[in-house]
Amino acid sequence: QVPLVESGGGSVQAGGSLTLSCMASVYTARSNCMGWFRQAPGKEREGVASIGTAANSTYYTNSVKGRFTISQDDAKNTLYLQMNSLKPEDTAVYYCAAGKPGCTVYPFTPGWYNYWGQGTQVTVSS
């Protein structure tokens, strides 16, 4: 069973909205934390938003605060990222990830995550 499968990427104009979904396997859904990362061409992978699955605590990188919302549906083993007021600088491949044992919503770095989806492209045009 594939650990994580993303969907929902696409192309939108600046100011538009997209919702990304990430379906987790039963195993990866048990992780203490889940997160969304993104990677633009020529740039390092950066954390966008994370959620603590038990306490529902969240963390957002500064550039997306107030625009993006991370959430989860435990019944569906699905993680979401609602993205509003999209900007061209949000263009990237977005990945969902499941954290290692002991992970917390912060620090939010790729090294704390050991299961990754295949990525979904988000393109925002000006």
Image (cartoon, grey):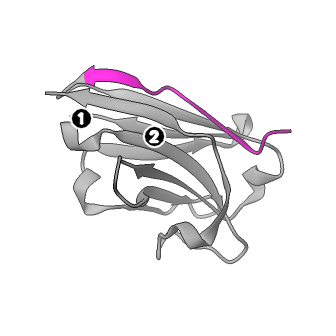
Q: How far is disc 1 from disc 2 in space, using C-alphas?
A: 12 Å
Vertical order, 98 against 90 (above or below): below
Q: What is the secondary structure assignment of the residue under circle 1?
A: loop
Name the residue type under label 2. Answer: Leu
Q: Which is more toward the observer, 83 or 114?
A: 114
Does the CB distance between marks 1 and 2 fall below 8 Å?
Answer: no
Q: Which of the numbered marks, if any, corresponds to residue 26? A: none
Which residue is found at the position 39% from the left and 61% from the top? 44
Which residue is found at the position 38% from the left and 45% from the top? 69
Q: Earlier in the sequence, mark 1 or mark 2?
A: 2
Q: Which of the numbered marks, if any, corresponds to residue 81? A: 2
Magenta stretch containing residue 8, yes or no?
A: yes
Q: Is residue 55 left or right of residue 8?
A: right
Q: Is residue 51 left or right of residue 124?
A: right
Tag 1 residue: 86
Magenta stretch containing residue 58, yes or no?
A: no
Which residue is found at the position 21% from the left and 34% from the top? 85
Which residue is found at the position 43% from the left and 55% from the top? 49
Where residue 3 sits in the image (x, y, percent)? Answer: 76, 45
Screen quadrant of the C terminus: top left
Q: What is the secondary structure assignment of the residue under circle 2?
A: strand
Q: Which is more toward the observer, 121 or 4?
A: 121
Where residue 76 sits in the image (x, y, percent)? Answer: 71, 34
Q: Which residues are magenta?
A: 1-12
Q: In the image as oriented, which residue stretches furthest toward the front? A: 42
Quadrant of res 13:
top left
Quadrant of res 53:
bottom right
